[in-house]
Image (cartoon, coloured by chain):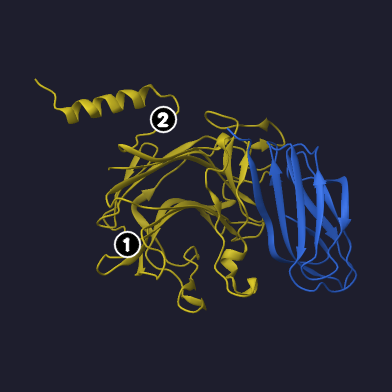
Amino acid sequence: MLPENITAIVARNEHWAGSAASEPYEAGWAHEAVFFVRALKEPTGSQPKVRVEISPDGMHWIAEGTEAAMPAHKDQIAGLRVKHFGGWLRIAADFDADATSAVLVTLHLKA
Amino acid sequence: MTQTTKEMTEAMRLAMLHANPKLSRFDPLPRIISHDEFANGHCGWSQLVGNYQDDLDTMLPGYAQHTSAMLSTLPHWDAGSHGGMGSSYALKIATRPRVGAQNAAIKRHTFRHRGRIRFEAYFTFKPEARELKLSETDVRSVGFLFDLQSGDTDKGGERVMPHLRFLNALDGRHIQKWQFKQRTTEFHPMGGDKIMSHYHLAPEGWEDLPGGDQRLCYNEIATKINWTYLCFDFDLDAMKALSFRCNDREFDLSTFDSIRIPAMKNLWCMLNFVLFAETDTDKRAFLYVDSICISGDF
C-alpha cells in the first residue's frame, strides 16, 4: 500500500486579526508536514510573521521554530515546512491593531 | 432437508463474515459497498464544503465553519492515546470552540441498485478536556445523515435526506435522545440554477423519535471513551427508512421521515453519507468514529 498523504484545509476564508491561529490538527501519523498560507484578499496593514506551533495535547502550544512572512498581497502564499512535531500542529500569527488578512491555510501531510 | 443454493450461499457468507475479525463486529447486507478502518487513511471521509460562486464569501456560514476531519489516536493529556477498537486510529470530527459550532465529514458515492442499504458504525463523542470536570453536557449533538437523489429517468424525482442525531445536551441541560428532521432551511441560489445551497444542519426543525430517549456510556471523565454501535437501514427504492438500532436498543421509526425536496439538476443517483458534531459550550466537541461498514442488498 502507498504511504498515506493528505491535504487538510484548516482555515478557509478566515479573517485573521489580533492573535490568530488555525484550529488544532492531529498529525501524529505523519513524518512531514507543509503549511501553505494564501491571502485570499489584499491584506491590510503591516503583515506579521506566521509561525508553526506544536502541542502535547492540542490545548497548550509552543513555537516549533519554523516561521515565514505572511503573504503581503492577494494570492501570494507563504510556506512552512516541518519534520519533527509530535502529535499536533497549528500555525499562529500576531497582527498589529490595524492589520488583517483573509487566509486559506492548507496542511499537507505525508506518512 | 435439502438446502437450496441460496440458503447454502447465505450460510457460507455468514460463516466467512463471522470468522473475519475485522468484519465480524458488523452485520452487513450481502454486498459490502465500503468498510472503513481509519488506520487505512480517511477512506473518503472528506470535508463538507459549502457551495459558492465567484467569491468564498457567498458560502453559507454553516458550511464556512467546517474544517477537515483528522486521523486520531484519541490522545488525552492525562492518559495518553486511547486508540480504536482494532487499530490505533479513528476518524475525528472536531468543532470550533464556540457554542453551537458544528463540523461534518462526508463520503460521496452514487448508487447502482435501488434497494436496502445499511449504515453501521462504531462511534463515541467527548468534549475537549479543558476542565477537570464531568463535562457530560458540553457536546450538544452527534449524528449522521444520507443525501440521496433518484435516478435521472425516474418520474417525480426527489432529493431525500434522512437525518438522525443524538441530542446529548441543549443549553446545559442533559437531554440524551434521538431526533430526526423533515425540514431544511431556505434555498440560496449561488449562481444560475445548478448551484444552490441550503444549510440542512441548522438547529431548527428537529423532532423527537418516539421512545428515542437513550442513556449512552459517557464514562465519568472527559478523557475516557467507550465505543457505541449504530445501524441504520434505508430503502433506496421506496426512499424510506427501515430500521435504526443503537447498541441494545431498536427504535420505532413509524413517525420518521426525511427532508424531501425536488430533485436538483446534477445530483442523479447521489448516495452521500455525512457524520456531524455540534458543541453546546465554547469548547470543541469531538465525534470519533472507529469504523464504518456500508452494505447493500444486491
x%, y% of residue B277?
54, 53
Q: Is residue B142 rendered to the left or right of residue B55?
A: left
Q: How far apart in space, not on screen, are marks 1 and 2 (Cα)?
A: 30 Å
Q: Residue at x 57, y 50 (%)?
A: B137
Given residues A73 and A85, the one toward you in this image is A73
Count of all numbered marks drawn on residues in the image: 2
x%, y% of residue B100?
59, 61
Q: Is residue B284 above or below residue B79?
A: below
What shade does chain A have? blue
Q: Residue at x 49, y 72 (%)?
A: B195
Q: Which mark is residue B150?
A: 1
Q: Residue at x 82, y 72 (%)?
A: A43
Q: Is residue B274 rendered to the left or right of residue B171?
A: left
Q: Residue furthest left?
A: B1
What shade does chain B have? yellow
Q: Which quadrant of the figure contains the C terminus of chain B?
A: top left
Q: Amino acid at mark 2?
A: Leu
Which element type, helix, strand or loop, lies under badge 1?
loop
Q: Residues within 10 Å of mark 2 (few under 14, many from 20)?
A: some
Q: Are marks 1 and 2 on the same chain?
A: yes
Asked whether the residues under the numbered discs 1 and 2 touch, taking CB atoms below 8 Å apart as contact, a structural biologist would say: no
| Location of mark 2 (residue) | B23
Res. B222 visible in picture: no
Q: Is residue A26 above or below residue A40?
A: above
Q: Residues within 10 Å of mark 1 (few under 14, many from 20)?
A: many
The subunit letter for the residue under badge 1 reads: B
x%, y% of residue B294?
40, 42
Which-is-in-front pick, marks 1 and 2?
Answer: 1
x%, y% of residue A84?
81, 37
